[in-house]
Image (spheres, grey):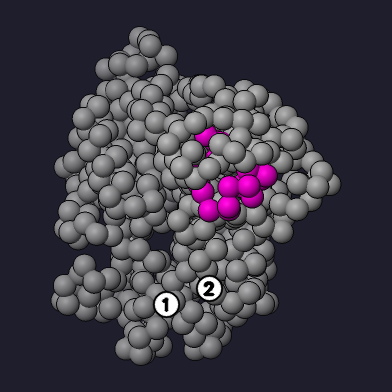
C-alpha cells in the first residue's frame, strides 16, 4: 500500500497536508468511515482521492452533477490517475467500456450519480468488482433540512447494507446542526468518525450594501477591481438573470445567463464557456454552481438575498477556491425582506419544519442587518466561535453605527395600526412625513394621529426603519405587501422592548481586495504573468480543457515569485506533480527563461 504523503507529492504536487487532511486520509485508508465537514477550497477532494489511490480496489464516488464529474475526472487524468465517470452524456458503448474496466480493475476511481448507484443492474456490477472505497460528495443533499435536498441521496443507505466492509466517507462544505444529524442518520454513519474543520474562508471579503440601483451598483462593484475577472452573479428569477446578463453586456462585460428554463444545449454551452474561458461573468439562478470546481472565481455577487445562511455560505464559497483574495458582495434591500417574510408566511408545511425555516430566515436577516463583524456572525451560525473581528468585511473596514430606534419603531407600528393594517411602506412613509398626496387624502389618512409625526427622519431613513423592524419580526406582511401588527409588536408599542437599528451608510464604498487580481503581481512582473497565463490558455485550448486543469493561478504565481531555472526547481513548486511536470514543465520553463532579468 503506497504512503499517502508519497501520493500527495508525486500525483498532486503538494509537499504537505493542510489542516485535518492527513488525519482524515489515514483514518479512511485504514478502513474507517468518516463524515467530513470542510469549507469550499479546503481540500475535501483529496480526503477521498488519496485513500482511493492508497487502498486496493475501485473507489466509487457519488457526485450530484455531470459538470462536477467531468471536471474532477479531467483534473485527475491530467495528474495521471485512472479515473472515469458514468452518466447520461456517454453513449451506450462508452458506458459498457467503463463497466468492463471497472470489472477488470483498470480504474482507480469512477464517478457516478446517486440515481445510477441505486439501480439493481449497477449494484450487481459492483458486487462483481473489487471495491476499496465509497465517497459521497455534497452529502448535505441527503438532508431535507439542507438547501440542496436531492431525493436520490436517500437511497445511499443501501451502500452500507449491501457492502458493509467497504469504508465510506461523506463530505460537505455546508451543514448546520440539524442537517448534520440528518446526514448521519440517513446514511447510517452513526459509527463514523466526524471531522469538522473550521468554516472560515479568510481570503473572502464579505460586503453588503443597501440596495438602491442594483444594476448600477453591481457595475460599479465590478469596475472597482474585477473587470476581466471571472465572477458569478446570483439572481432569484429567470427573467432577472436574462435582464442582468444583457445589461452587463451593454456595459462592456462578457456575461452569460444560466437558469433551468434555458435550452439545455445553450445552458451547457454557457457553463462550458465559463469553465473553459477566463474573465467571464455568469449570471445565474441557484440552479448553477453546486460542485463547480473553477478555482479562479474572484467574486460572487448577490442582487437578491439567498434563501438561508447555508445557501449564502455555499454560494459565496465558490469564490477564491484557490486561496487567493476574493470578494462576496450583496445588494440587500427592503424588497428582499418582504419577499422572504411572505414566503415564510405562505409555508404550509408541518410546525417543526416552519419553526426551522423561520430560524434559518431570522439568522440570515440578522447577518444582513448586523453592525458586528460579519465573519463572526457567519461562523457562530455554524457553531464556530471567532474571538477577534476579522478585519476583512465591510463592518470591520467601515464600522456601521447603531442607534436607538425604539421611538421610530413605535411611530412606524402606530402608523400601521392607525391606517388599517393593509398598506405598504410607500404609503406609510407619506403619512409619517405628512405629505398630502391624493392617496393619503382619499383614505382620510391626513386626519389620523400619526400624520406628520415622522418629519424628524427622511424618506430613505424611514425605508431603513421599516426594513429593519420587518427583518426583526416586529411586524408582518401579507401576500399583497401590506403591513400588519404581530404579537412581537406589542412590547415595542408599550415601551417594554428596546429596538436598536443600524444606520445605513449614505453611499456604499467598495474597496479592492488586498493583493487581489489584478495587482496580484507587480507591474514589473505583469508581462511574465500574462505570458504564463497565455501558455496555460494555449495548452488548455489544444486539449479542450479548462485552463485551471493545467495549473491553478496560485501555481503560476509561485512560478513568478520563485522563477525556477530548471525542471528540478519547478518540481518543488506547489501543485506540480510528476505527470504535470512531464507534460507541461518544459513549456512553462521556456516562458520563464525567456523572461529572465
SS assignment for the magenta stretch, majority: helix
The residue carrying mark 2 is 348
- Give me the disc on residue 329: none
The residue carrying mark 1 is 152
Of 218 and 11, nearer the camera is 218
Residue at x-position 58% and y-position 52%: 420
**Residues at marks 2 and 1, CA–CA distance in whole angstroms:** 24 Å
Q: Is residue 520 above or below residue 571?
A: above
Indicate the secondary structure of the residue bearing disc 2. loop
Please state the extent of the stretch shown in magenta in the rendering.
412-431
Q: Which of the 4 image quarters holds residue 128?
A: bottom left
Residue at x-position 57% and y-position 29%: 433
Q: Which of the 4 image quarters holds residue 388?
A: top right
Whole-percent x and y of residue 427? Answer: 50, 40
Left or right relative to 406: residue 309: left
Left or right relative to 342: residue 177: right
Whole-percent x and y of residue 130? Answer: 42, 81
Amino acid at each position: 500500500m503506497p504512503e499517502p504523503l508519497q501520493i500527495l507529492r508525486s500525483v498532486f504536487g503538494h509537499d504537505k497536508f493542510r489542516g485535518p487532511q492527513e488525519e482524515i486520509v489515514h483514518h479512511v485508508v485504514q478502513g474507517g468511515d468518516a463524515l467530513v465537514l470542510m469549507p469550499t477550497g479546503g481540500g475535501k477532494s483529496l480526503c477521498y482521492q488519496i485513500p482511493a489511490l492508497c487502498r486496493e480496489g475501485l473507489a466509487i464516488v457519488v457526485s450530484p452533477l455531470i459538470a462536477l464529474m467531468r471536471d474532477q475526472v479531467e483534473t485527475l487524468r491530467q495528474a495521471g490517475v485512472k479515473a472515469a465517470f458514468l452518466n447520461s452524456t456517454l453513449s451506450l458503448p462508452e458506458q459498457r467500456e467503463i463497466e468492463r474496466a471497472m470489472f477488470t480493475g483498470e480504474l482507480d476511481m469512477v464517478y457516478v450519480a446517486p440515481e445510477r448507484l441505486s439501480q439493481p443492474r449497477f449494484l450487481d456490477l459492483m458486487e462483481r468488482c473489487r471495491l476499496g472505497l465509497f465517497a459521497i460528495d455534497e452529502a448535505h443533499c441527503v438532508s431535507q433540512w439542507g438547501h440542496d435536498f436531492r431525493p436520490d441521496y436517500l437511497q445511499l443507505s443501501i451502500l452500507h447494507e449491501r457492502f458493509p466492509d467497504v469504508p465510506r466517507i461523506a463530505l460537505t462544505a455546508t451543514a448546520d446542526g440539524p442537517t448534520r444529524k440528518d446526514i448521519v442518520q440517513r446514511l447510517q454513519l452513526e459509527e463514523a468518525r466526524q471531522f469538522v474543520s473550521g468554516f472560515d474562508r479568510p481570503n473572502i471579503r464579505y460586503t453588503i450594501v443597501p440596495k438602491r440601483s442594483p444594476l448600477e451598483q453591481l457595475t460599479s462593484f465590478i469596475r472597482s477591481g474585477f473587470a476581466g475577472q471571472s465572477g458569478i452573479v446570483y439572481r432569484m428569477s429567470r427573467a432577472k438573470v436574462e435582464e442582468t446578463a444583457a445589461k452587463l453586456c451593454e456595459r462592456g462585460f462578457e456575461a452569460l445567463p444560466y437558469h433551468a428554463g434555458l435550452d439545455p444545449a445553450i445552458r451547457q454551452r454557457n457553463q462550458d464557456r465559463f469553465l473553459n474561458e477566463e474573465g467571464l461573468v455568469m449570471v445565474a439562478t441557484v440552479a448553477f454552481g453546486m460542485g463547480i470546481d473553477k478555482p479562479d472565481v474572484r467574486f460572487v455577487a448577490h442582487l437578491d438575498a439567498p434563501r438561508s445562511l447555508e445557501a449564502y455560505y455555499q454560494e459565496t464559497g465558490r469564490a477564491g477556491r484557490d486561496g487567493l483574495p476574493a470578494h462576496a458582495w450583496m445588494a440587500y434591500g427592503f424588497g428582499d425582506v418582504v419577499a422572504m417574510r411572505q414566503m415564510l408566511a405562505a409555508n404550509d408545511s408541518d410546525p417543526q419544519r416552519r419553526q426551522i425555516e423561520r430560524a434559518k430566515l431570522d439568522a440570515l436577516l440578522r447577518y444582513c442587518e448586523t453592525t458586528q463583524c460579519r465573519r463572526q456572525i457567519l461562523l457562530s451560525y455554524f457553531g464556530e466561535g471567532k474571538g477577534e473581528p476579522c478585519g476583512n468585511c465591510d463592518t470591520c473596514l467601515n464600522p456601521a453605527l447603531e442607534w436607538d430606534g425604539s421611538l421610530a419603531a413605535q411611530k412606524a407600528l402606530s402608523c400601521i395600526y392607525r391606517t388599517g393594517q393593509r398598506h405598504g411602506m410607500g404609503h406609510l412613509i407619506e403619512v409619517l412625513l405628512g405629505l398630502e398626496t391624493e392617496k393619503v387624502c382619499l383614505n382620510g389618512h391626513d386626519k389620523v394621529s400619526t400624520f406628520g409625526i415622522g418629519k424628524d427622519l427622511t424618506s430613505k431613513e424611514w425605508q431603513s426603519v421599516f426594513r429593519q423592524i420587518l427583518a426583526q419580526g416586529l411586524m408582518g406582511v401579507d401576500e399583497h405587501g401590506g403591513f400588519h401588527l404581530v404579537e412581537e409588536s406589542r412590547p415595542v408599542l408599550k415601551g417594554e422592548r428596546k429596538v436598536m437599528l443600524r444606520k445605513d451608510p449614505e453611499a456604499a464604498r467598495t474597496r479592492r481586495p488586498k493583493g487581489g487580481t489584478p495587482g496580484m503581481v507587480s507591474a514589473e512582473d505583469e508581462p511574465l504573468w500574462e505570458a504564463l497565463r497565455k501558455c496555460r490558455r494555449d495548452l488548455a485550448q489544444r486539449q479542450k480543457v479548462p485552463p485551471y486543469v493545467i495549473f491553478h493561478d496560485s501555481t503560476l504565481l509561485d512560478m513568478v515569485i520563485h522563477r525556477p531555472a530548471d525542471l528540478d526547481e519547478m518540481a518543488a513548486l506547489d501543485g506540480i506533480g510528476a505527470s504535470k511536470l512531464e507534460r507541461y514543465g518544459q513549456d512553462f520553463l521556456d516562458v520563464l527563461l525567456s523572461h529572465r532579468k
